[in-house]
Amino acid sequence: DTWIDGKPIYRKTIVYTATTANNNKTGVTIENLDTVVNMTAVNKGTTSGAFHPHGMLSNSGVSAVSGLHFFNCYVDENHEVCLFVSSSYIGTAYITIHYTKTAD
């Protein structure tokens, strides 16, 4: 497959286990990253064993802040894959990134 600019699309899948809430850097950097075309991920919660999709946001508590649960992945300015999770979503994430490179 190629992107709209004609560059080949590459795919990288990583498995990362978050052991703490909030921002987790996976230690995986995408070399020569030009454009992130698509990113998908699922998280398997350590406590519940349930699978949650990337972008998951739910509110199971009384207040909008205290009951907020989230699971999100992103690539930072240094091209490192990161995972941002609440304590209820600590667990193993399966992240697939589709991207183009600056040079092939």
Image: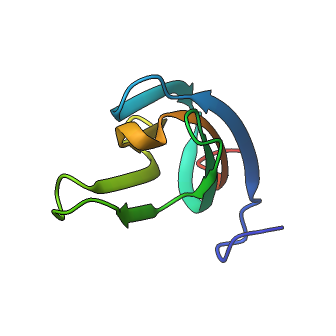
The residue depicted at 45 percent of the width and 38 percent of the height is: 82
Image quarter hosting the C terminus: top right
Q: Is residue 77 visible?
A: no
Where is residue 84 shown, x and y percent of the image? 38, 42
Q: How many marks?
A: 0
The image quadrant of residue 13 is: top right
Residue 37's x, y, as percent?
A: 60, 64
Question: Residue 47: where, in percent of width, then height?
Answer: 55, 35
* Residue shown at 35% from the left, 32% from the top: 21
Q: Would residue 89 be found to the left or right of residue 98 on screen?
A: left
Q: Is residue 14 above or below residue 20?
A: below
Question: Left or right: where does residue 66 sit relative to residue 8?
Answer: left
**Residue at 26% over, 55% down:** 67
Q: Is residue 92 above or below residue 75?
A: above
Q: Residue at 54% of width from left, 30% of height from top?
A: 29
Which of the colour schemes (rainbow, by chain, secondary structure, one colour) is used? Answer: rainbow
Which is nearer the eye, 13 or 63? 63
Query: Left of 39 or right of it: where is 25?
Result: left
Task: Name the outermost residue toward the right.
Answer: 1
Q: Quick check: can you spot residue 47? A: yes
Q: Quadrant of residue 8?
A: bottom right
Outermost residue toward the front in this view: 62
Residue lying furthest bottom: 4
Q: Quadrant of residue 38?
A: bottom right
In the image: residue 13, left or right of residue 74: right
Q: Position of residue 1 (x, y in %)?
A: 84, 67
